[in-house]
Image (tube, helix red, strand yellow):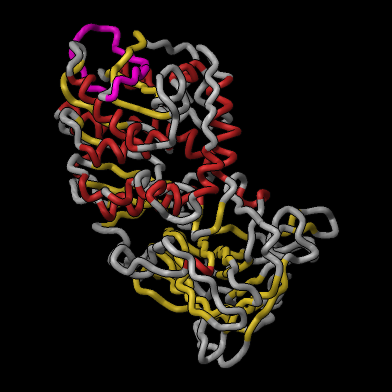
Amino acid sequence: MTDVSHLKPSFIATITARDGIKLAAAVYLPEDEGRYPTLFAASPYRFDNNAAPAMPIFLWRETGPIDYYLKHGYAFVHLDVRGTGRSEGDYRYMCEAEQRDLYDVIEWITRQDWSNGKVGGIGQSYYARMQWFMGIQNPPGLACIAPYDGNVDTYRSSAYTGGIPGAFPSTWYNSTTRCINQYPASGPSRLLEWDYVGAVKAHSTYDDFWKSRAAAENLDKIEVPVFSIGVWSKVDLHLNGNIVGFQRTKSPKKLLVFGSSSLFAAVADFSSEAFHETYLRPFYDHYLKGLETSYPSEPPVRYFVAGAETFRTAETWPPKEISYKPFYLRAGPTGSVSSLNDGALSEEKPGEGETSYDYPNPQWRAGVVGFDRNGRPDPVGHVLTFTSDELAQDVEIAGPIQLNLYASSSNTDTDFIVKISEQYPRDKGADPSAQPRNRVVTKGWLRASHRMIDRERSLPYAPWYLHLAPEPIEPGKVYHYEIAVMPTAYRLKKGSRIRVEIANGDSQLTEFVFQHEYTPNKVGRDTIHHDAQHPSHVMLPIVTCAD
């Protein structure tokens, strides 16, 4: 990892936006004078914090290695978005004025005597989201964007996943964005006074507040080449944005999805020079310098398959070499895991049966996670599980997943938080009281009242919800829910089991900062129906030609 604590800007520029607001940007230039292509990064994380080392403890250090690009003949401009850092104005989270500023700054860059007139977007997370908006506006001089790990719709990706309010907006704004503006590594303190968290609470449906801040609405307007880079482990926040961004963009595009083990690893990867040397600089060199590089010959889609520990290539996403197979929820027990029900998952259709659970469970402690008799966290002991037999051979999946769930509730609304896991065989000599080891492969979320689907924007096995006007459910009535489980690529090993977990909550112990709020109105009983008339099942994208 590169230590950039020594890095200082060549100068700090003041750029006047079209409405008169003065924006501040750190400009970094190569040592030799000349005209250079420029990489442009924008966020509320302020360029004064570039003095901090690029380590995962500082998750907001998401510009990539600035000095690396200076050494390879690029200028680098890092903008404090309006109302943050040293820029004037009021911060309003990716508002239309903030988006327009990107256009104005890119125009300013192309007029400078150190610029060759070509600009490329760079950066992770917030920086990536800004790149989507750069591309949508198509300012003169913008030549390409490479959004790494960046969603296209904050409502659907973190604020209200599946319509369920999440805890992330508060953590992100109060503990991160406000904090690092007030206590920067260098430069003046800045207090962000706007109540973003209150605004999130006030806009619980996908109204104009969110629509104006969603790049997903206008991705088809992007004209410049796009290199969309996602991370499977960022399923709670950014992953689907990179997938949807790739699918909806009509300009020249490619998709690359990594298997970084966590959000910390994803930041460490993007901070490393090796990552940029291998993946990103060939893209920038081609479109910003006109060089012949490896990028044009790369396939349209490259994705990592965890479990197989290899990359695969495809012409499209999802890959054409898949076929969907239903796995049905059935009554158990399987004897393979200790849970509320120990239900089964089978390729055979169910005959009759239903599974009910009361909530909140008295054994829940940290969200839905309880603790075993030895004090170890137990994420599945008090939730519903449906587990397959041991796999007779490896099974590889790649693509979006849909859970067709038939359920009823004692309430007028309820939540479904779904996880699909690989449950490993028990180790010989393992503590018989311990749960079998497992790995969460992917997740899905849906609030019952938000079940209405936008059929025009949905793709096969990838429902896109409207989130416009929640419709309460009738207590006791069975409804069919089409639950979008986020896309993935994974190889489940022979001897393991496929496990579906269902609850109406999750936990800070398992979701870190991405847990969902468990509110006092979530008291009642839900029933999962799995009989001939209500065949609840998950549709898995099975790769038909995996080696």
Q: Where does the C terminus fall, quadrant-wise?
A: bottom left
Classify residue 495 as left or right of residue 16: right
Seen in the picture, residue 220 relative to 460 is either above or below; the reply is: above
- Rendered view: 541 above or below 280: below
Residue 426 placement: quadrant: bottom right
Whether residue 136 appears in magenta in the rendering, the answer is: no
Q: Is residue 132 above or below residue 403?
A: above
- In which quadrant of the rendered view does residue 421 lie? bottom right
> What residue do we see at 25% from left, 18% from top?
73
* Residue 292: x %, y % from top left: 15, 32
Place of residue 430 in the rendered image (x, y in percent of width and height, measured from the top left): 76, 61
Range covered by the magenta-colored residues: 19-38
Residue 210, position as x, y percentages in the image: 41, 48
Q: Is residue 120 visible in the rendered structure shown here?
A: yes
The image quadrant of residue 137 is top left
Q: Is residue 477 left or right of residue 491?
A: right
The reply to whether residue 258 is in sight is no
Residue drawn at x 33%, y 32% is 97
**Is 388 situated left or right of 83 in this image?**
right
Magenta-drawn stretch contains 36: yes
Residue shown at 48% from the left, 44% from the top: 260
Residue 436: horizontal and vertical position, in percent? 69, 63
> Closer to the camera, 409 or 194?
194
